[in-house]
Image: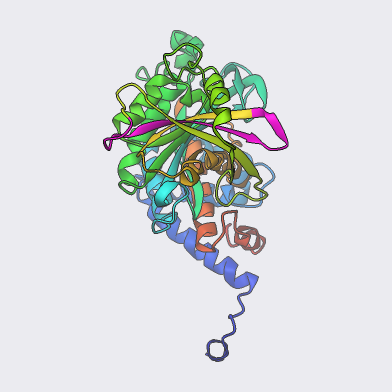
Amino acid sequence: MRAKLLGLPPVVTGQERAGEFCGRLEQLLVEAGEVFPRADLRRRAAACLRGLLGPLSRKNGWQVSGHAGEASPWGQQHLLDRAVRDADELRDFTRRCVVAGLDDGGAGAGPAGCGVLAAGEAGFAKKGRASAGVARQYTGTLGGVFPCQIGVMAAWATSAGQALAGRELYLPREWAGDRERRRAAHIPGTAGFAAKPRLAEAMIARILPDLPAGRVQAAADEVYGRDGAFRAFLEGLRLPYAVNVQANTTVLPRPGWRHFARLVERAAAGGDRAGLPAGPGRPGTRPWQWRVRQVPGPGAEIGGGAWVRWVIARRRPDNPAERDYYLAWGPPETPVEELVRVPGARWRAEEAIKLAKPAAGMAGYEVRSFHGWYRHITLAQLAAAFLAVQAAAEGGTGTPDAPAAAAERGGTG
């Protein structure tokens, strides 16, 4: 009371913050436990989540089990492999937690207070041939071509923070007809080859009904943005977007104006580039130079209330030769200052993946089966979502420091 009368903020100790963190975690465990059919699975899932949030050097079955006081990893292996349960129920629970926990009341990370639904991917280094979907393939998160698994991810970002809200395992073509490998990895017959944009479409269609109506923008990197069917899918949902594309992407049918790079160069004499930041809230953000041009497109006439397309190019003032190109689609009245917020917010998916890998053990799994991958990734995404929501509640966008304090006191064990 005295602090209130004097206008002084109350002193909150690390112990009190750790206690509050643990209380919220226990509430989450109770709510998440409802999706598990048996009491033993609920206990193991709770132990797994505590371990994923704990101060472990590696968050595999052995260390998570040891953190729970178990002598062997059998219980955790059973949870991820042999237990009869549906990982999609926990996926839907995680998505609802992300949407509710990152609700910012319309402040938004995109134009006009919209949130940004960003598609991206995460690579997981794997040796051998047994893990479902493993192959030598390129992944930006690992920085080259490596034997790895690739997960297509969807992140929901608002001004409060960002967290992963969907996941799909990419199966390369070499797995499509290899019955022996598929049988050994327990890949169901319904799971065949699907291009990454098709996996992203399935996630977006699943997530969109839970997002605030009319307050969503889509963003994606070049793997998805260069796919015309993916852009047509977003337009069919009437979901505005700004996606990364290649410099030689066709824009207009006229000779000499077909490619992004050519169109940008021809428009260069029309005025100076706008110096605007790449997006809200990113530490150390420097201004980029943007050029935005509205163009007609198939089935989209400029004016008359119809939605329109823009070509967007950005570059660093200190390195004008290095450019990024984007294709955007949305309401024609969208201001340039707001339009560039969507491609600038695409990094939020990368930030969500970076949080989930070390802080929530998303890359620490040792499972090989198809369903084991989904079960582990879903549990890790729930753990990472909990951290993101707690950071949002404390007014930040990073990982709160309460987990470390709680772990030191045994609160998460």
Q: Which of 279/129 is in front?
A: 279
Q: Can the viewer see residue 133?
A: yes
**Residue lying furthest left:** 304
Q: Does the magenta stretch include residue 305?
A: yes
Residue 171 drawn at (x, y percent): 48, 19
Image position, residue 270 (x, y; %) = 54, 32
Instruction: Give the total number of marks visible in the rendering.
Output: 0
Q: In this view, does 169 lie above or below 409?
A: above
Q: Does the magenta stretch include residue 383?
A: no
Report the front residue among 16 and 130. Answer: 16
> Magenta region, mostly helix, strand or loop?
strand
Indicate the position of residue 325 as horizontal and vertical percent values. 55, 28
Q: In this view, does 260 lie to the left or right of 192?
A: right
Residue in the picture at 54% in, 38% down: 74
Q: Nearer the viewer, residue 382 or 295?
A: 295
Q: Residue at x 44, y 43 (%)?
A: 116
Quarter in which the C terminus is drawn: bottom right
Horizontally, is 288 left or right of 100 in the view?
right
Q: Nearer the viewer, residue 87 or 170?
A: 170
Where is residue 49? Give x, y as percent: 52, 49
For residue 386, side relative to residue 282 (left or right): left
Q: Give the range drawn in magenta.
A: 302-322
